[in-house]
Amino acid sequence: MPHTQDEISRRLAPPLLCWYRENRRLLPFRVDPTPYGVWVSEIMLQQTRVAAALEHYRRFMAELPTIAALAECDEQRLLKLWEGLGYYSRARNLQKAARVVMEQHGGQLPADYQALRALPGIGDYTAGAIGSICFGLTVPAVDGNVLRVFSRLYDDSSDITRPAARRTCADRVLACMPPDAPGDFNQALMELGALVCLPGAAVRCAECPAAAFCRAKASGRAALLPVKAAPKARRVQPVTVLLVKNGAGEYLLQQRGETGLLAGLWQPFLCERALDADGAARLLRKAGLRARYTGPGPLAKHLFSHIEWQMHGLCFEAEGEAPAGCVWAGRAALDETYPLPGAFCAYRTYMAAQS
Ligand code: SF4
């Protein structure tokens, strides 16, 4: 007989919390958590692995240790601190929310789910994480890990990309949540998903504190869950990256427009279509530069949620004033001043090595 919903709700919390207290990773935002630190970490960890976010988190908190400092930070500096994490709207929303917190909440994150939820960039998950971890609110925090754990605990084949499945999961989390430890319970679920209830066949049921009453473990379907609709195919976009160097060894960087993909960030001079060396030279002439083609540059690919950029580099030497919206940048400026998104990682490495 599969275990009933009531039975799972009743049995989950005690062994899970014990397991969590013995096995949790000592991450910097878990040690003596502050609302601001939890907020920044939760926003960083959306779409980013823990290991990749840790160094960014330390640098960010060292430079912007308070909500007031975040609210006042120059936007380009903020984007530089976010460089490499992707999804830069997260950083902009953090700052917008920090300004609202300064103006409307006296510089402190509000201890109220709806007020948290109303801040820019804070959705159900982040409001649940901050509310439960920092303020002891009994609210769920459902991320991808928790969706996977609960799909399996209940042997539920609902498509987890659908809002109804997320709502059902949130209701189930709430039914299992001990009122005296909501923050630890939410974190324990996320940690279980990150360390034990791993995707696909990597799942480690033998180490799981919920194995005795997990329905998918009993049915042998754990590796098949959760069910998730396939994402739409990405549109392939050819991109020509012009690596243009001047006599001082500086490279031409161009700021992207204020809206759209990678808004406001910097890139090598580029054209979002396929160009050969002659076409690229004409483009540079039109921009007011005398340029000489010196050879091909790196090939690279970058996946956005809906587009795949297939990039090829063309190298030039050029003289002249930087065109409007562009700058000549040497190694120090590349490292410290201009935020270049991870999409240009291969080109950044190339420019740093050549400048
Ligand atoms: S028993 Fe296995 S499938 Fe069930 S929650 Fe634990 S790790 Fe996941």
Image (cartoon, rainbow, N blue to C red):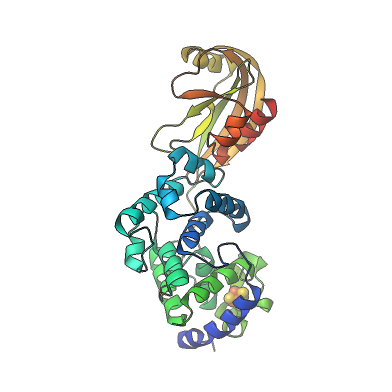
Total labels drawn: 0
**Residue ID at (39%, 54%):** 121
Above or below, 135 against 118 in this view is below
The image shows residue 114 at horizontal and vertical percentages of 32, 66
Q: Quadrant of residue 318?
A: top right
Q: Residue furthest top?
A: 290
**Residue ID at (44%, 62%):** 126
The answer to whether residue 220 of the structure is visible from this angle is no
Above or below, 315 against 134 in this view is above
The image shows residue 11 at horizontal and vertical percentages of 53, 87
The answer to whether residue 134 of the structure is visible from this angle is yes
Residue 291 is left or right of residue 170, and the answer is right
**Residue ID at (54%, 18%):** 280
The image shows residue 158 at horizontal and vertical percentages of 46, 69
Above or below, 87 against 33 in this view is above
The image shows residue 232 at horizontal and vertical percentages of 47, 49
**Residue ID at (43%, 81%):** 175
Above or below, 281 against 226 in this view is above
Q: Quadrant of the N terminus?
A: bottom right
Q: Quadrant of the C terminus?
A: top right
Residue 49 is left or right of residue 78, and the answer is right
Q: Quadrant of ligand 1?
A: bottom right
Residue 288 is left or right of residue 333, and the answer is left
Q: Nearer the viewer, residue 353 or 206?
A: 353
